[in-house]
Image: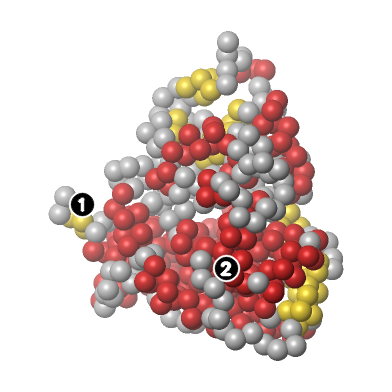
Amino acid sequence: MTTPRDAHVGDYDPLASDDPEDVRATFDDLRGRCPVAHSSAYGGFWTLSRYEDVRAAASDSQTFISSVAAVIPRDPRGLRRPPLNFDAPAHTPYRRALDRTLQRSRLDHLEPRLWEHARRELAPMLARGGGDVAQEYGVRFPAWLTTEWLNLPSDIAPELAETSFRWVSAWRDQDRDTVNEASAAMYEMAWDLLRARKADPLPVEEDPASSLLAERVDGEPLLDENLVGALRQCLVVGMVAPPILLGSVTQHLSDDRELQDRLRANPELMPAAVEEFVRLYSPYRGFARTVSEAITLHGREIQPEEPIALSYVAANRDPEMFENPNEFILDRPNIRQHLGFGRGRHRCAGMPLARLGIRVALTHLLQATASFHVNGPTVGARMPEVGLTSVPLELTPARQEPRLGQMARA
C-alpha cells in the first residue's frame, strides 16, 4: 500500500543541524524507520538511506537519471554541465575523454609534483604551529591537484583556491549573487583553457581539454559550450570534497591518537586507511537523481521531476552492509564496496586522482608533524555536503622534515 502525499511532508528536516554527528544520527533513524524519506526543504525531495537502495539507484542510469536534478539544492539557473548533468549516450564521450587522462602512468607522472605542493602548502601552518586545516591546507593543496591535472599555468592555483572556496561557501548559503560572480570567474578560466588547447593541443592521454577536443560524435566535434561546461565542472569538482574530508579525518585522528601515531610510523598503511576514511567520512548527502518513470519504493510513490538524494554517507554506515559501521577498521574485508565515490555511470570521474591526492595530503601531514590535535570549535557543512568545513589544529612539527615521495603508493 502506498503512502498518501499529505502523510509524508516533513518526514525530516535536513536543515535542522549541520553537526555531522546529528546528520548521521538522523540517517540512522531514517534507515530503520523510513528508508525512503521525504523533506519539504529546497522545494521538496526524497532521500534514500539504505545501502542496497542507494547502490541500486546509482547503478540504474536508465531509471534514475541525472539530467533533471543531479544535486540538492538544485542550481536555480538551470545550467546543465556535462558529464554530471547528462545521461547516456550524450554523457559518454565526456567521461571517455576524462577517463583517458587518469590512467596510472599519468598519475605516476603527477605524483612527485604533488608531494612538493603538499610540502609548500602545509609549511605556513607548520611555521605558525597551527591553523585551519580545512580552510587552508585543505583548500590550497587540492587547487594544485586540479591545476596539475588540467595543465593550467601555475599562477592559476591560488586564484582557483580562492574562487572555488568563495563559490562553494556561497552555494551552501544560497547566496546567489556570489555564486554567479565566482562561477563566472571559473567559466572564464575554462574558456581561456579551451582557447589555449585549440591553439596548441597536448597529447590526449595527458590533458583533459585536448582529450575533450579530440572526441567525436557521428564524426562531429563536441560543442564548445559543452566543452567549456565540462572544463568548468573539472575546475570545481575536485575542490568541494577534499577540504571536508581532510577536516573530518584530522578530527578523527585528533581523537584517536593511537591511530594517528600508528599511521605516522607506518605510512605503507595509508592506502588502506584512505579507503576506510572515505567510507566513514563520505562528504555527500545531496547528490541526486530523478526517475524516468513513476516508481514505488518501500511503499513510497515517486514521480518524475521529484529529486531523490542518494545519501552516500548513510549508505556507507549501513550496518546491514558494514559490520560495526561507525568504527574505523583497517583492511575491512568488504571495504571496496563502499560508495564514497558513487557507483555506476556517474561515479566520481576523478576517483584515481582523488585517492592519490588524499593519500599524499594526509601522509605528508602526518610525516611533517610529531603530533596534532583540534584546539577550537569546528564547523559542519550544510547541504549538499556533510562533514567539517572548519577545523582548527595545533601542530607540533616533526624534528626532521620528511623526504618527499618516499611513501608507499596506493
Q: Residues within 10 Å of mark 2 (few under 14, many from 20)?
A: many
Name of the residue lying farthest toward the bottom: 400
Q: Residue at x 58, y 48 (%)?
A: 333
Query: In the figure, 224 relative to 30: above or below?
Result: below
From the viewer's perspective, is residue 21 above or below residue 267?
Answer: above
Q: Kindly indicate the quadrant of the structure image that contains residue 380.
A: bottom right
Q: Which amino acid type is shown beneath numbered disc 1?
A: Val
In terms of image quadrants, where is residue 95?
Answer: bottom left
Give x and y (percent) for residue 204: 28, 69
Please tell me how crowded label 1 is: few (under 14), some (14-19), or many (20+) other residues with Cα within 10 Å: few
Query: Where residue 281 appears, x then y in whole percent?
Result: 65, 53
Between 70 and 93, the residue placed more toward the observer is 93
Q: Residue at x 64, y 38 (%)?
A: 318
Image position, residue 156 (x, y; %): 49, 77
- Residue type, numbered disc 2: Arg
Q: Tell me the residue at 84%/66% (across/down).
A: 376
Front disc: 2 or 1: 2
List the residue tagged with mark 1.
Answer: 217
Residue 293's image quarter?
A: top left
**Left or right: where 226 falls relative to 18:** left
**Percent x, y for residue 335?**
57, 49
Q: Classify mark 2: helix, strand or loop.
A: helix
Whole-angstrom CA distance, mark 2 to mark 1, is: 37 Å
- Identified at 50% across, 47% down, the residue is 342
Q: Earlier in the sequence, mark 2 or mark 1?
A: 1
Tags 2 and 1 in contact by the CB under 8 Å rule? no
The residue singled out by tag 2 in the image is 359
Q: Is residue 159 visible?
A: no
